[in-house]
Amino acid sequence: MKTLRRNEQIKALAVRVINEEHEQLGLMPIEKALAMAQEQQTDLVEVSPKANPPVCKLMDYGKYLYKIKKQDQKHKKMAKKTEVKGVRLGVSIGQHDLDVKVKQAERFLKDRNIVKVVIIFKGRELMHKDLGREKMLEFAEILKDIADIDSPPRHAGYQTVMVLSPKKT
């Protein structure tokens, strides 16, 4: 959250002053603007420091900070957190089973989640890592319209892992 200069922190000699209803009160020396703020029991807050002259607003700075904090909390609550969903395949998976896993992955990707595809090798399947890699690439090829490959198939221990993310729209 950015902090704004207020009252004595404002360095400009002259400022353009507006009130809380965004009505212009005019261009005036900083001393007069500070006196006006004190008279109305509000703060003089520099809302546009880069303007020439800087624009200052008469407002209750504490209320402003409270409102900004509440807005941030609301936006944070509404933001969807991306999850990593897993899909497990086998080296000798049948076509129908592969289609079911593809539909499952499509659903995850449409919900804007990342999909981690894993093939676990059992026993002698470990000698055919290339078959597992081909299966992974086939899986990615089917989903190429809605997914990008974040990390290509990598073999680690008894498993091969690939990560897919939803395409940027």
Image (cartoon, rainbow, N blue to C red):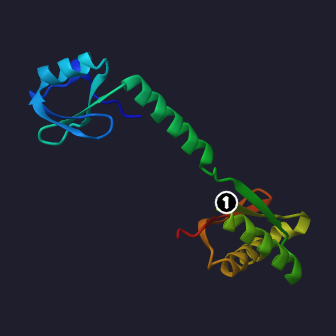
Measured as percent of width and height from the top left, residue 167 is found at 57, 70
Residue 40 to residue 12: above or below: above
Residue marked by disc 1: 113
**Is 21 placed left or right of 8 in the picture?**
right
Q: Looking at the image, which residue is at 79% across and 64% down? A: 87
Residue 21 to residue 78: above or below: above
Q: Looking at the image, which residue is at 56% across and 37% down? A: 73
Measured as percent of width and height from the top left, residue 135 is found at 76, 77
**Is 68 placed left or right of 101 in the picture?**
left
Residue 151 to residue 66: above or below: below
Measured as percent of width and height from the top left, residue 27 is found at 11, 35
Q: Indicate the quadrant where residue 19 lies.
A: top left
Q: Nearer the viewer, residue 139 or 63?
A: 63
Quadrant of the drawing holding the N terminus: top left
Q: Amino acid at mark 1?
A: Asn
Measured as percent of width and height from the top left, residue 143 is found at 68, 77
Q: Indicate the quadrant where residue 160 lies.
A: bottom right
